[in-house]
Image (spheres, helix red, strand yellow):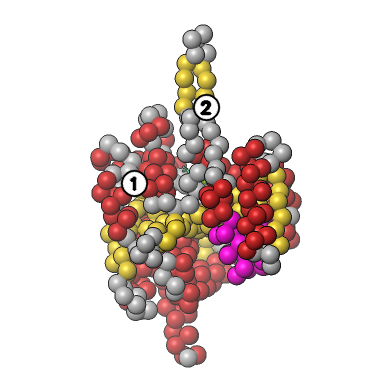
Amino acid sequence: MSVKHILLLPGDGIGPEVVKEAEKIIAWFNQNKGTQFTTSMAYIGGIAYDKTGTPLPKETLEAAHEADAILLGAVGGTQWESLDYAVRPERGLLGIRKELGLFANIRPAMCFEALADASTLKREVISGLDIVIVRELTGDVYFGTPRGVETLPDGTRKGVNTMVYTSPEVHRIARVAFELAQKRNKKVCSVDKANVLECTEMWREEVQKIHDAEYKEIALSHMYVDNAAMQLVRNPKQFDVMVTGNIFGDILSDCAAMLTGSLGMLPSASLGAKDKNGKTSALYEPVHGSAPDIAGQNVANPIATILSFAMMLRYSFNLAKEADLLEKAITEVLAQGLRTADIMQDGGKKVSTTQMGDAIIKTLAVLAKKEEKAA
Ligand code: IPM
Ligand code: MG
């Protein structure tokens, strides 16, 4: 494998702590599996605002364009909540998604067997759960104009955001979902609010068109977003791949994440289109946020970030075996009963952020040795 550069964007809150554990894993792969990853770090979010006056400095964006893949921790925190929208930490994240054209957000929600009892839902509802939400990431009310708040002549205020999608935007995200479903159980559920919102009625029609023209072998269904939220909680295993717009995807993916027992467990990938050199921009990040309440205490769960690195191995570097190994190590560590505070259960062994990272590395070494022996 040639040298590949990973840009680390730790960000705010628990971001730096969890990214540090992923860095240890990256170093392990370099030392033991012949990968040649180089890393560098840049500011994003609140810390970037504090240091440079903007949540997405020019240097960060340049480094992002040059990197082969990006690993992000989290952005945001209470100390930045009163800032103007334009410079809030979240703008850094939205900005990098937009600037790199990361339109496809892939959020798997799988239930680790060892954690099936950590969910607020009954074990039988979520045991074995393995679904993926494909969320469109660069359109919708997140970026649509007009937007903003104005004070009217009579002194009352009016707030506006605009839901916008074009058919090419719908087509490309639909294709990502269908392609993914082809490698899985060949089922796609497209989520919209076509009974009320014209924009999403168009979404429904265009997804159907792509299906009929290119992916007839996939079972496509459509669901209204309110029903989808209900079905996710009632019987999540009915789904395989769900595809939806930016705002619905934001909400449904948090819901799906919680089904699995902990938001601290789930990775995500945000992928762009292939550029003219055949390169796909890709940013990997945990689904959870910056959790300012527990930041700096060495208690956060690094697994979502480490699983995000596993997704990077798989999607950006085509290293499926290495990704499998890493995911296996995590499953094993959980089976051994090791738990960070967020997934702590009766009889579990409570560990810190760094201890969890160390345990995963130790298990990686054991599994790798076993594999060598078997080969
Ligand atoms: C997410 C987050 C972001 C979003 C925020 C932090 C801007 O909730 O990645 O789901 O709304 O997309
Ligand atoms: Mg969200």
Question: Residue 306, image x and y in percent?
Answer: 44, 63
Q: Secondary structure at mark 1?
A: loop
Magenta stretch containing residue 179, yes or no? yes
* Amino acid type at mark 2: Val
Label 2 within 8 A of ligand 1 by Cβ: no
Residue at the front extreme of this rendering: 213
Q: Nearer the viewer, residue 162 or 210?
A: 210
Residue where numbered disc 2 is placed = 160
The reply, left or right, for residue 32 in relation to residue 356 is left
Mark 1, Cα crowd under 10 Å, few <14 / some 14-19 / many 20+, is: many
Residue 319 makes an appearance in the image:
yes
Residue at image coords 43%, 69%: 313
Give the magenta-colored segment's residue range.
174-189
**Gap in angstroms between the C-alphas marked 2 and 1:** 27 Å
Depth check: 125 or 140 in front? Answer: 140
User: Residue 44's mark?
Assistant: 1
The disc, 2 or 1, on the residue closer to the chain's N-terminal end is: 1
User: In the rendering, at what x and y percent does residue 247 appear?
Assistant: 56, 42
Residue 8, by quadrant, is bottom left
Q: Position of residue 27 (x, y in %)?
A: 33, 70
**Residue at screen point 48% across, 30% down:** 146
Residue 305: which quarter of the image?
bottom left
The secondary element bearing badge 2 is classed as strand
Q: Position of residue 303 (x, y in %)?
A: 48, 60
Q: Nearer the viewer, mark 2 or mark 1?
A: 2
- Which quarter shows the N terminus? bottom left
